Image (cartoon, coloured by chain):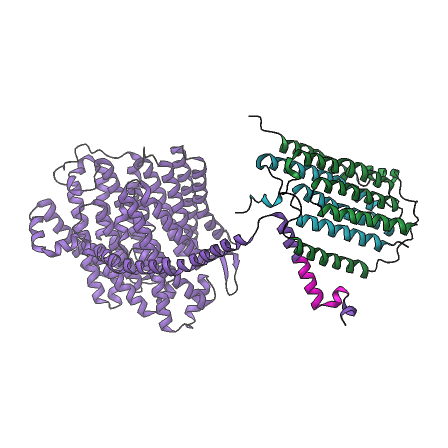
Chain colours: A cyan, B green, C purple
Amino acid sequence: MITLTHYLVLGAALFCVGLYGVMTRRNAIALLMSTELIFNAVNINMVAFSRFQEPGFAHGEMFAIFIIAVAAAESVLGLAIILAIYRSRQTVNSEEMKLMKW
Amino acid sequence: MQQFLFYTFAASILIAAVLTVTVKNVFHSALYLAFSLFGVAAVFALLGSYFLAGLQILLYVGAVVVLSIFVISMTKHITGAGAAGTGRRTLPALLTVLASGGLLTNAILRTDWGAPFAHSYGAGTDAAAIGSHILSDFVIPFEAVSVLLLAALIGAIAIIAKDEK
Amino acid sequence: MDKISLLAALIPALPFAAFLAVTAFARRRPMGAALTSIAGTAAAFALSCAVLYAELTAPAVHAVRAEWLQLAFVNLHMGVLVNQLTALMLFIVTFISLLVQVYSIGYMRGDSGFSKFFSFLSLFTFSMLGIVVADNLMQLYIFWELVGLSSYLLIGFWYDKPSAAAAAKKAFVVNRVGDFGFLLGILLLAYAAGTFDFSGVIAFVSSGAVPPARMTLIALLLFCGALGKSAQFPLHVWLPDAMEGPTPVSALIHAATMVAAGVFMVARLFAVFSASPEAMTVIAYIGGFTAVFAASIALVQDDIKRILAYSTLSQLGYMILALGAGGYTAGLFHLATHAFFKALLFLGAGSVIHAVHTNDIWQTGGLHKKMPVTSITMLIASLAISGIFPFSGFWSKDEIFSVLKAGGHTGLYLAAVAAAFMTAFYMFRLYFVTFAGAPGEKSEHAHESPAVMTVPLMVLAFFSVFSGLAALPHAHNIASFLYFGEPERAGLNTGIALTSSAVAVSGILLAWLVYSRKALSAASLKAAAGPLYSLLRNKYYVDEIYMFFIRNVFFVLTAAVKWFDRRAVDGLVMATGLGVRRGGDGLRRTVPGTVQSYALAVFGGMAVILLASAWFHPDLFGFGGLLK
């Protein structure tokens, strides 16, 4: 029997993998992709909660939909920024993106 | 059957995700990501949210990943050694992630979730329910998101646009 | 809430409204400014007359007050206290202020700061009336400082003239010295009494709960305020310099009203001062000394306004002397009569300056024919200040002499008589040199001032002649109106009247002999006086002595303080700042600057904190069973 706990542990595991990617990837695009993993971990939790805690309602799914929309906007802007940085500095290495450090 | 499907999907999601964050080649990384997101869509379907599963495939796999691949190919030396692979913080990151995961799992396992409703697979919410939600009690967030997307669109164009000088 | 106190509360408000209106709307409309200002003061004057009339017919104390601030140990009020003293002062201040403002229309005509001048005059009138109606020490102090401010603004009115700017600064700084003592006195008194209200303070002091030494200290500190405002020795140095201001200002502020604030304050708190006989003695001697000291300087000055300024010092000395000797009525009576004739003298001097464009009396002469109104009114004022029967000064000076004689202060009495002799001499020296004799080099184009200036002179001349009659032995005379404790019934003392008249007449005769008849040459007098002459001429070198101390003592001290502040205090602050900066600079280098490292720090830190919490409080995290 697959219970809520299974889905939540799956979400937690996916979240941790995404977090690892965010902390370690050098390529800024890969970094953004890692954040997508984190979003998906959250979405799994949302849908699972919706399904198990209040069946018949779709509130969790609604949240997931909005998260997907915001994530899309985020990735568009993130990629745009990366592209702009690439244009001016010829790099997508996140280690070199530290202009704000004095 | 459910257990088999769940574990299969979960395993493929996690393996693909781990590959996404570890392989050197960013292009491969994007492909693993797409695979992983497919798995998430399958989990949604398993949970009965077919509409969301479709949305996941269309938006994430269809749009976000493809966009990422575009950008990867537009930035030329992606496969070069400089920006590939993982950085120096591997060990501390691994420890942090394991600690976080342990804490999260501990919290999940020790929380009393009440008596979960036994849900019948296959009898999920249909798109009509979601649609009526969007146009009734979620209409204001919906409108706000549409404005947000428009702003993101314009913002992206403004950031990318070359200075015409 | 009675009508009289409400009227009295309205009196300061009217000039204040005029001040606001002029400042806000009439900067570019000179006549509008003048008329607004005069209308405000005229209305205040009308109300003051009503208050004075009410007090004359039915003397009573009217008070109204509202809570202002509640402090831990004392409550502050805003209030109005009207008694006979208030009524008289309200009348004098609004009356002189009104006449001076009318006069200023003529005197200040064409000045670029015409509107500003009137707004300042209104501000001054407001502040002075605020002092007069205040019902507690703190309110009095606030208006006291406001008066100081308006005085500063008006002395430095022609601020592009360096001497005027310096004089304004000097007045402000010298007053600060006095006001510092005043504030200490107020706080000491209010702390002991537990209230700032006059009635409460006076009741407290009369109860005799204060040890005599403490009482003397409080009285002397309070008197420091009067030293500054009423320009008594040794804080008198600012008043002669204040003559750099426009002459109407000198008349209003530095002769008739503001400098009377110190005298008024001593009178208002007379119960406090009289509780300490030692302080009263000190006050009397300071007053007496200032009277003689300033009169002797006035003997040899050349500047018409400076002569009058030293004369003011001397007359204020008389008032302080009278109060210090216990002559409450005498001091205030002299304040009233002096306000009239000194305002008249200054306005007359202003009229002369307006005509001849010089302050030096030796460059004028024979102005009587060209400026008859000014000359005659000046003569009246000179007779009044010299104390010639039946002019007002005669009556008020005699009151003071009687008080001194009755109190057995023989030394002070002789000093006062000597000062009276000198007063008569220097006033008529001024009069003969300016108006009589041959025309001076600048008298040629002199002409009488316009009516807007001469009418105030005539009104003041009327009061200079007749205001003394209030002292006639009569049921409603000044002594039964203004008194402390018991109404005084000291009638006219023939001996004293004859002495003072003889002294005044001989002073005038000497001046006539020297400066009009030229029977005695001024040069030979000068030679006879020798070093004394140069001593007087240089005002006893007081300014020089002060400067010497400021240079050699004060500046050395301030240099030491500056060194300590710069090196020790600032050094500590700088060291702290520098340390933080260096430390931050060092820490900065340890930060990689990439977003990812920050993410690691955030999540790693969170994990460490959670794990540590789980270690120390296992139950919170459900590890209780696990670790046991």
Quadrant in which residue C569 is drawn: bottom left
Residue C596: x percent and y percent? 63, 49
Q: Is residue C409 above or below residue C451?
A: below
Q: Is residue C192 above or below residue B87?
A: below
Is residue C499 rendered to the left or right of residue B148? left
Residue depicted at x 12% and y 40%: C437
Q: Is residue C613 magenta?
A: yes
The one nearer the camera, B6 or C57, is: B6
Q: Is residue B122 above or below residue C285?
A: above
Is residue A96 rendered to the left or right of residue C202? right
Residue C410: x percent and y percent? 21, 67
* Stretch in magenta: C605-622
Quadrant in which residue B154 is drawn: top right
Quadrant in which residue B56 is drawn: top right
Q: Is residue C2 above or below residue B147?
A: below
Is residue B28 rendered to the left or right of residue C219? right
Q: Main secondary structure of the magenta part?
A: helix
Residue depicted at x 72% and y 57%: B98
Residue B6: x percent and y percent? 87, 50
Number of numbered discs: 0
Residue C60: x percent and y percent? 45, 58
The one nearer the camera, C483 or C155, is: C155
Q: Is residue C603 magenta?
A: no
Please identify the residue farthest to the front as the structure is shown.
B81
Is residue B82 rendered to the left or right of residue C70? right
Instruction: Identify the image quadrant of the C terminus of chain C.
Output: bottom right
Residue depicted at x 75% and y 64%: C621
